[in-house]
Image (tube, rainbow, N blue to C red):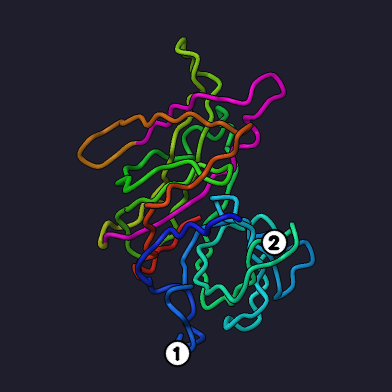
Amino acid sequence: MKKLLCLLVVIPMLLACQDDHDDVDYRNHYIAMGTVLNPDTITSFSLLLDDTTMIKVDQSAVAYYRPFPGQRIIADFAVLSEYSDTTFDYSVKLYDVYEVLTKGIFNITEITRDSIGNDPVKIKDMWLGGGYLNVEFYYMGYNKTHYINLVSDSSKTYTDGKIHLEFRHNDNDDYPQYNKWGIVSFKLNSLESDTTNIIDLAVEANEYYYGSRTYYFTYNYGNGQLAPVSRKIVPENTKAVFR
């Protein structure tokens, strides 16, 4: 039997508190990150967590929430029971949800090179999980929409055998009034091939105070990427606006 791995040991402020959690047994309560499996776009859906645990939302306190398949979310839920079949591991009640910006890899061109932006951010954490590169970050802004992308630039050549990507931020000329929080998941399936199941990644980011910094990962998609049990993600109430 799989053991449910939780991402958090504290309860953050998520998108919509529809329930006061009075009926929660906190020994069976979790906040975890995963990918929605919901082809019919209904209120009862399943969620594949980054540790490969499959949960089914059989009860929900988030009225009328209908996520699209492939949407990444941080889910606040309580385990109701274990499933005896092989499809799902647990039946859960959903109490709250935070939708994570979910994107693919953007292939940069000469036309888009300037508009994609490369304004600084502060990387709080970057990790692989669920077939995604997940990035938790801060940025300075006020009231404009910021744009976040993971970029592949074919005009640049490297000899280290790694796939080089760039985490790009366009602040849209926003005034740097407040420190804001964001989290994004970039799907990595476009990098996969039939000839190997392991890819070495180098991800460059333009950071406040540090300038260009590179983060290195080994993406083992043949074995699946398990989210570390100690991963902590706290959606912060900073009124972030980005896409």
Horizontal relation, residue 34 to residue 202: left or right = right
Residue at 55% from the left image edge and 25% from the top image edge: 199
Q: Position of residue 34 (x, y in %)?
A: 56, 56
Mark positioned earlier in the residue sequence (1 or 2): 1
Q: Position of residue 176 (x, y in %)?
A: 27, 56
Q: Which residues are magenta?
A: 179-205
Q: Position of residue 94 (x, y in %)?
A: 57, 75
Q: Work out whether residue 88 or residue 68 is closer to the camera in this orientation and state it.
A: 88
Image height of 227 relative to 94, above or below: above
Name the amino acid, label 1. Asp
Reply yes or no: does residue 9 show up in magenta. no
Residue at 69% from the left image edge and 63% from the top image edge: 68
Q: CA distance from mark 1 to mark 2?
A: 26 Å
Name the element at disc 1: loop
**On residue 163, which mark appears?**
none
Q: Main secondary structure of the magenta part?
A: strand
In this view, the residue farthest toward the top is 159
Q: Work out whether residue 142 or residue 229 is closer to the camera in this orientation and state it.
A: 229
* Quadrant for the N terminus in the image: bottom right
How many neighbours does mark 2 have within 10 angstroms: few (below 14), some (14-19), or many (20 or more)?
some
Image height of 79 relative to 171, above or below: below
**On residue 22, which mark appears?**
1
**On residue 88, which mark appears?**
2
Residue at 68% from the left image edge and 76% from the top image edge: 58
Name the amino acid, label 2. Phe
How many neighbours does mark 1 have within 10 angstroms: few (below 14), some (14-19), or many (20 or more)?
few
Reply yes or no: does residue 184 show up in magenta. yes
In this view, the residue farthest toward the left is 209
Image height of 2 relative to 94, above or below: above
